[in-house]
Image: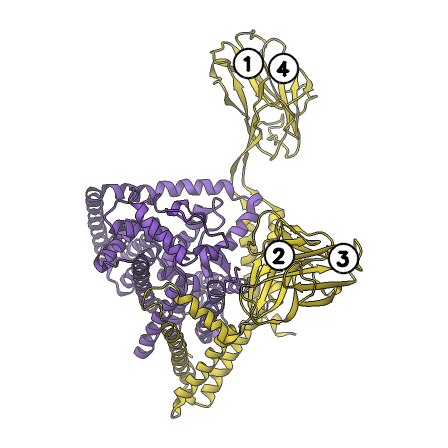
Amino acid sequence: MKDIKVLFFIFIIFQGVFYLLLVPPWQSPDETHHFGCGALLSKNAKLGSKNHKIVSKEIVESMANFHAWQYQNIPRPEPMPQTLSELPYYQGIESVSGREPLYYGINSFILKVFNLKKNIDQFYLIRFLSLLYFIVTVYFLYLSSKLVFKDNISYVFATVCFVALLPQFLIITTSVNPVNLAVVLGAAFLYVILYSLFKGKKLIALLLGPIIIGLAFFNHRVALFMIPPFVVLLLIYFVRSLKSKREMIKIFVITLIVLLIFIFLFFTAQYFFPDQFKRVVSISGLKPRIYEINEFGKYISPGTSRSLTSFLDGSFKTFWFFAGWLRFGYHLDIYSVLKLICFLSVFGLFKYLYLYFSRRKYSMDVDFSSFLILIAAGLPIIFGAIIRYYPTSIVAQGRYVYPAISALAILFILGLKEIAPKRLEKWVPIFIIGGFMALNIYTIFHSMFRVFYYFTNA
Amino acid sequence: MPKIFKKKNIIPLTYIVLIIFISVFFLSISPPTLIEVYNQSQNDIPVGEIYGSMKIGQTFEADHKDLSAIEVLLATFSRVNEGTFVFHLRDSLKSEDNMVWYNVNMREVQDNKFFRFSIPKIKDYKGKRILFSKGKKYYFYLESPHAEPGNAITIWSSSENLYKDGEKIINGVPSQGDLVFKTEYELGWMLSYHTLSTRLMNILNFSLNLFKNQVFYFVILLMSFVWAFITLVTKFEIFQRKGGIFFVFGIVFFVVSLWIVLLFMKKIEVYNQFVPNNAAGEIYGGKKVGQTFTAQHDHLIAIEVLMGTYNRKNTGELIFHMKGQAGDMIDLHHSRVDMLNIKDNRYHRFKISEIKNSKGRKYFFYLEAPQSQSGNTITIWCNDEEDKYREGAKVINGEEMEGDLVFKTIYAVGLGGKTGLFLGEITRNKPSPLNTKLLYVGLIVSFVLTCSLLLTYIIRVFVETYVIKKKEGHSEY
């Protein structure tokens, strides 16, 4: 058991390094922007000041070295512009929103500590930091799935493989992107909640939960979607405590203390980081989300169903694999089979619910309370991404739901477990692991090699 | 009775079908929505002051069923006007009855701003709500009988007839131009039968297409292989034998390596230009349609062109020519194709004898069908909008034209060649030690070894956890 765990992590390190080096510099979505912001901070320049031109110029020169335009099939700009924002297609660093202060702050700190001179060295250093986030994410998922699947090792590894071998996740998670920090925080948060639920240690969730949410708010607006599972956990505690008055008072007091700590932290943060805080609050707040839901309601009608279908189709593809700033995907047949598998998984989740509510004599392998937490962690972020980006964008990129990847992975595997006939249930994890290995090898040695190294242009 | 029709199979199948149907049903229902339609927005001229017996109006066609407001661009001549004007809405130009009408104080009108006339929910004499019909024509007009010149409002209009579904009406007579107006519809909960049926058909098509999908069969093959392999490993108790794990590892390593080598062996297909937006026209008689291009790699072996058959079966012969450059007299290669073998909107591959040192060289290919006639020939898809492919151009009858054909070039670079291309590119301009080829070779080898070893261990755990326990008679398995 220990051997296989060690081996698994050695494998994912090799694989992570492979992906990290395989995707050419600046070829993951928004890398120019996200790297630029961290690099600019490390030079002690405030984001948005005129100093961005120095960093911007270095990035443009590096892009020219790595023929960034050839991958997008657009002509190399002549003469080469001095700043990123003058380039076609690529995002600059002048318009930085400051909504990811934590991520950029960490990047800046790392760059200062290592003090590397060359821009490309700094870039790979940050990519290796992302790899570290990836490994930690996988480890937290491993711990979470061990709790959920009650040490059923085959299902635990199948769950971990979903994340560790998901091609697009690997591309994003080994690139320079603030979503990677959100993913780690999301995975850690889920583990804390599940650990607290399974081990009955309420204080851990009640203390660590809000701290992680608070940190996540300083990193990415998706932190908002950590609140639903936390609320579900509190509700579970509340329902359980109804059996004992003393327990109920205890929970109430702890929640109150945590709330007070949270309010204290809120005001402290506001005092120490006023600028970043304003931006974080305005972007991550509930009000914009409600506005987006309202706007979404206007658009979603049968008249626009066709574009919604293609929007969802695009989102699905970008969840699985769509490399090079979303230019290069799989053959459509592969997506069809992946859709079939996802549909089966969703049916499996419905079956789980049906069996639970029908109260048949059926031993549930996964507790209903943990199922509720997983649903609360996975579903709102999916709907949130759709509402946020439909119809203003062509797709809601899969990476927007990656912060809930741990919950989605466990649900995906649970669904397949439930839908499989009982006599085949034991085979499901081995098929999943085999399938993911095959898909991953195909992605590396065919899909990625052909676009990044043989320049097939599609 | 076939196995699939047994009760225990019918229940889950019904369950899945029900879930699909209910989901699609709910997804075909749209929530209440407010839709604003800009019917006519061009404002060249005002219609003049509205006073006395003047009636200025517009007929329009309802775009949806629940009309909730009409907004008209009014003007006050930059002054405050006193008195009132009247808004009328009728179900046709000829109708004498108002569906809605009301007096408005002219003081409420802001200069050059849309004025909103809300349409209340109207009921007939039986108390039943009157719905505005989608596609039906309605008529609204404004009048201000008590206003006088110098104390009246006006409406902005276009000088030309820009709104196709209605007319500007002055004193009951259709006139040149259209009023500037918007309509707003407040749609309630709605089930679209069309959307429902389309979505159900899409799901049916998706399910049927799976059986044509090669990846689907590959997945089944992979699952069968895994099942057969593990069953054999268990049956012959390989893990219990000395060196058993190495034997299994060897096989897994071989399969993983074979899968990688097979992927490496694939030919390189370069999509030089893949966006079609026009057809090059029928190819017959003296017409020759071609493209110049620069080979991206060595070992050029074929060219694929996106063809169109006009959705018909064409007969005759198509001739493919390949030259060093457009003006060359001698073909490097030529071949003849029966048009019956060409599929509509599919790439057709024209094989050529391998050109080993093709990289960086310019070539020219064209297609002709001298024996064919209009109505019985094919075409080639191309892009005329912009120069998508910069290393060549479309050539028609020997003349370079704007745009490019939709075409691919195929290269048989081989295992060694592809590895060389990969290592050359991945190490280019990278910082040390990332610019060392050996690093990547080591990485690939480590990847394959750890992947195979991990799979071997997972199989062992699986065999020991499930299969052996089952043999030993553990009830839970």
Of tags 3 and 1, the one toward the viewer is 3
Q: Are marks 3 and 2 in contact (CB under 8 Å)?
A: no
Q: How many dots with numbers?
A: 4
Badge 2 is on which residue?
Answer: B406
Whole-Å distance between the Cαs marked 3 and 1? 67 Å
The amino acid type found where label 4 is placed reads Lys
Between disc 4 and disc 1, whose residue precedes? Answer: 4
- Subunit ID for the residue under disc 3: B
Which residue corresponds to the image point at 65% horizontal and 34% vertical from the top-left? B135
Residue B461 drawn above or below residue A373: below
**Residue found farthest to the bottom:** B242
The label shown at residue B85 is 1
Q: Position of residue B217 (x, y in %)?
A: 57, 72
The numbered mark, 3 or 4, whose residue comes first in the sequence reads: 4
Helix, strand or loop at disc 1?
strand
Mark 1 closeness class: few <14, some 14–19, many ≥20 residues within 10 Å = many
For label 4, count other residues whose C-alpha is less than 10 Å away and answer few (under 14), some (14-19) or many (20+).
Answer: many
Label 3 crowd bin: few (<14), some (14–19), many (20+), radius 10 Å = many
Q: Which mark is residue B377?
A: 3
Seen in the image, is B404 located left or right of residue A393? right
Q: Amino acid at mark 3?
A: Thr
